[in-house]
Image (spheres, rainbow, N blue to C red):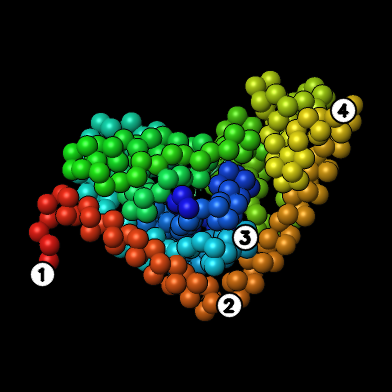
């Protein structure tokens, strides 16, 4: 079975609709066909300041949401990044293989450091794509299911894998991004030209899966569309309507053309009311299942402990090979 690896940050508590449709939904599907490794990336989370208690709670919350979304510990390996020390260890080797200019070209650093100012942002935030490289290469992943915003980091991963293999001999699988066109980028409900994001979106533009479903329905109904009334999928001319159609289509499995036909001549109100119901029907059981996992932290923690144990077997093997290739003297 080909292997997949992906991760999600335990920041901001709730996952949003972009995380789910862009990434987690594919994770659930891929556990049926792939040898799948999924993790809550707490090492990545501390690239921005975190409250320790909140980080701990959000890590459990992220794992609970992944299970609620349909990850099955019998079908995939689910773990917390910091439970597998090899991530940080391989990241150091990858840091030493990356050019400073090359790292400077990663656009997420510019976006994410803009708030604090690049001078005050942590060096961890700067090198975070390189930790991501290590995350992926440790598992010899063939594919990495992510949203479009991660494409540049997968490119860097490919470059570094090839560079290492070229310099030290075949060691790493060169991975490919797994990005579905329809859900590659879910847009902000209030500004459909930017991606829905936990750090950049305003509360009204962001659908958090764990929010009160009534509030979520309201957000969908007040999503920005345009002054025209025609329901047509056209991301350039009609980004707001197209975003709603995309979300609707993915959550219900109805084709876009079929939706266009269904709403022909009906106006945006009807589309938004129906979509609000579709989203509420999705988030309501999701919230309940998440709560069930949170109510039983012992079971949750042992799922994560078992996942870390399985992950470490693979990670340790890759790290040992890497250390040997680099020329580190083996410890006797
Ligand atoms: P931040 O804005 O702080 O980076 P985020 O909302 O992007 O947070 P992450 O934890 O960085 O959340 O991303 C988790 C996964 O969700 C990644 O694979 C990412 O590509 C995907 N993702 C995030 N936002 C979207 C979106 N709007 N559309 C599609 N996929 C998305
Ligand atoms: Mg992101």
Q: Is mark 4 within 8 Å of ligand 1?
A: no
- Marks 1 & 4, CB-CB < 8 Å contact: no
Between disc 3 and disc 2, the foreground one is: 3
- x 59%, y 34%: residue: 181
Mark 1, secondary structure of its residue: loop
The residue tagged 1 is: 332
Q: Is residue 36 left or right of residue 322?
A: right
Does residue 223 show up?
no
- x 16%, y 54%: residue: 324
The residue tagged 2 is: 296
Mark 3, secondary structure of its residue: loop
Q: Earlier in the sequence, mark 1 or mark 2?
A: 2
Between disc 1 and disc 3, the foreground one is: 1
Frontmost residue, 46 versus 118: 46
Alpha-carbon distance for marks 3 and 4? 34 Å
The residue tagged 4 is: 264
- x 12%, y 62%: residue: 330
Q: Earlier in the sequence, mark 1 or mark 4?
A: 4
Q: Is residue 305 left or right of residue 164?
A: right
Picture disc at residue 70: 3
Q: Earlier in the sequence, mark 1 or mark 3?
A: 3
- Marks 3 & 4, CB-CB < 8 Å contact: no
Alpha-carbon distance for marks 1 and 2? 42 Å
């Amino acid at each position: 079975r080909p292997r997949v690896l992906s991760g999600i940050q335990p920041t901001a508590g709730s996952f949003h609709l972009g995380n789910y449709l862009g990434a987690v939904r594919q994770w659930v599907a891929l556990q049926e066909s792939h040898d799948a490794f999924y993790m809550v990336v707490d090492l990545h989370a501390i690239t921005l300041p975190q409250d320790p208690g909140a980080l701990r709670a959000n890590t459990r919350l992220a794992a609970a949401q992944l299970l609620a979304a349909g990850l099955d510990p019998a079908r995939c390996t689910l773990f917390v990044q910091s439970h597998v020390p090899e991530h940080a260890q391989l990241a150091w080797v990858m840091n030493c293989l990356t050019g400073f200019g090359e790292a400077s070209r990663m656009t997420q650093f510019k976006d994410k450091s803009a708030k604090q100012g690049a001078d005050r942002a942590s060096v961890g935030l700067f090198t975070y794509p390189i930790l991501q490289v290590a995350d992926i290469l440790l598992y010899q992943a063939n594919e990495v299911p992510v949203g479009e915003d991660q494409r540049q980091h997968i490119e860097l991963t490919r470059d570094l894998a090839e560079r290492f293999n070229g310099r030290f001999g075949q060691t790493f699988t060169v991975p490919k991004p797994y990005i579905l066109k329809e859900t590659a980028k879910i847009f902000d409900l209030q500004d459909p030209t930017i991606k829905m994001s936990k750090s950049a979106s305003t509360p009204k533009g962001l659908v958090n899966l764990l929010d009160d479903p009534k509030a979520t329905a309201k957000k969908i109904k007040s999503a920005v569309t345009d002054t025209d009334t025609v329901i047509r999928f056209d991301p350039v001319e009609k980004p707001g309507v197209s975003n709603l159609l995309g979300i609707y289509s993915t959550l219900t499995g109805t084709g876009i053309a079929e939706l266009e036909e269904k709403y022909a001549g009906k106006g945006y109100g009807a589309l938004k009311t129906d979509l609000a119901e579709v989203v509420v029907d999705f988030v309501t059981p999701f919230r309940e299942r998440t709560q069930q996992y949170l109510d039983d932290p012992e079971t949750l923690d042992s799922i994560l402990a078992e996942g870390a144990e399985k992950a470490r077997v693979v990670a340790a093997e890759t790290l040992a090979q890497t250390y040997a290739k680099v020329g580190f003297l083996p410890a006797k």
